[in-house]
Image (tube, rainbow, N blue to C red):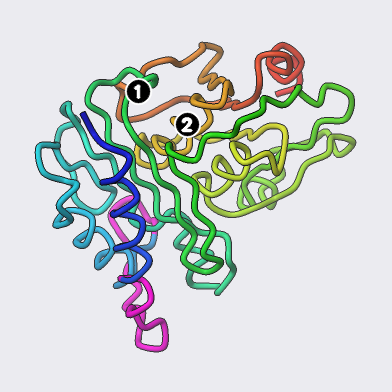
Amino acid sequence: MFSSDLGQQFVDDLRAFCEQLSLGLDLCIETKSDNTLVTRIDQELSHFCKNHPSAAGFHFYSEEDHTTLQFPAMVVDPLDGTLELIAGRPECAVSVAWLPTPDLSQGFAVVFNPFTGFSLTSADRAPWKAKANVDEPIGMISRTEWAKGLYQDKSAHLIPRGSIAFKLALLASGTCDYVVSMRPKNIWDIAAGTMLCQQRGIEMWSGGKKIERLDQALYDFPLIWAQPELIATLRAQF
């Protein structure tokens, strides 16, 4: 069983590691085979996660280092939001989920934003449960998807932000009411954020189906994360 003490130790070690990572040096930006960008920071963070004591006993599955998804799995996006890192926007996050099985009710998750110091983990449980904001819900969406014109309903209360992992952590923390994506997502993009949401009663829907297990490498759109009271309305809207 993964302990919350080990999860907190990971966050503390990660924070210290990020403090000594220099953004002033060349980011060594490269284009990968899928036309996405990777930097020296992504690679160094992936290496840190793989070699952390918390990785022991887990199959490592990272955006920068993966083969076959096997369980128990440590699913890592070393820095979700590489475009935000390059732009210097504080909208990226290290996303890590320890999944003994694909069942979302188990495991431990961490999302950490190195620009702001914001972090949320499975150990950060709120004592009170909030009601869903069904009157004027505020959603967060991808900056890239917004720029591409994938959201035609301009009357909706939508806020473009970088990094799906960061947006999901903000949703889990109560900063917005839902998150939507109109493009497929890899498991490393969403594992930690989805687990944090699920632990707070927030559902995930992918391609019209409710997701309760993360046992696929890729998830189809539309992707919706929201409290159950909002799901029907959001599915009709998106």
Say which amino acid is labelled 1.
Leu
Image x and y of residue 138, in percent: 79, 37
Question: Which region of the structure is painted magenta?
Answer: 17-36
- Image position of 66 (left or right of 38): left
**Taking 117 as reference, is 238 above or below it?**
above
Residue that label 2 marks: 194
Q: Look at 56% across and 66% down and name the residue there.
A: 116
**Taking 133 as reference, is 51 above or below it?**
below
Which residue is more in the foreground, 210 or 9?
9
Residue that label 1 marks: 214
Image x and y of residue 194, in percent: 47, 31
Element type where label 2 sits in the image: helix
Q: Would you say the magenta stretch is mainly helix, strand or loop? A: loop
- Image position of 22 (left or right of 44): right
Please report contact status of discs 1 and 2: CB closer than 8 Å, yes or no: yes
- Was residue 107 drawn as part of the magenta stretch in this picture? no
Element type where label 1 sits in the image: loop
Image x and y of residue 16, in percent: 33, 71
Dot 2 crowding, Cα within 10 Å, few <14, some 14–19, many 20+? many
In whole angstroms, how far apart are the C-alphas of marks 1 and 2?
9 Å
Q: Considering the image in quadrants, where does the N terminus appear?
A: top left
- Residue 15, by quadrant, is bottom left
Q: Considering the image in quadrants, where does the C terminus appear?
A: top right
Q: Look at 53% across and 30% down and name the residue there.
A: 197
Q: Look at 51% across and 12% down and name the residue there.
A: 210
Residue occupying the far left of the picture: 57
- Image position of 152 (left or right of 120): right
- Was residue 24 drawn as part of the magenta stretch in this picture? yes
Mark positioned earlier in the residue sequence (1 or 2): 2
Image x and y of residue 62, in percent: 25, 47
Say which amino acid is labelled 2.
Thr
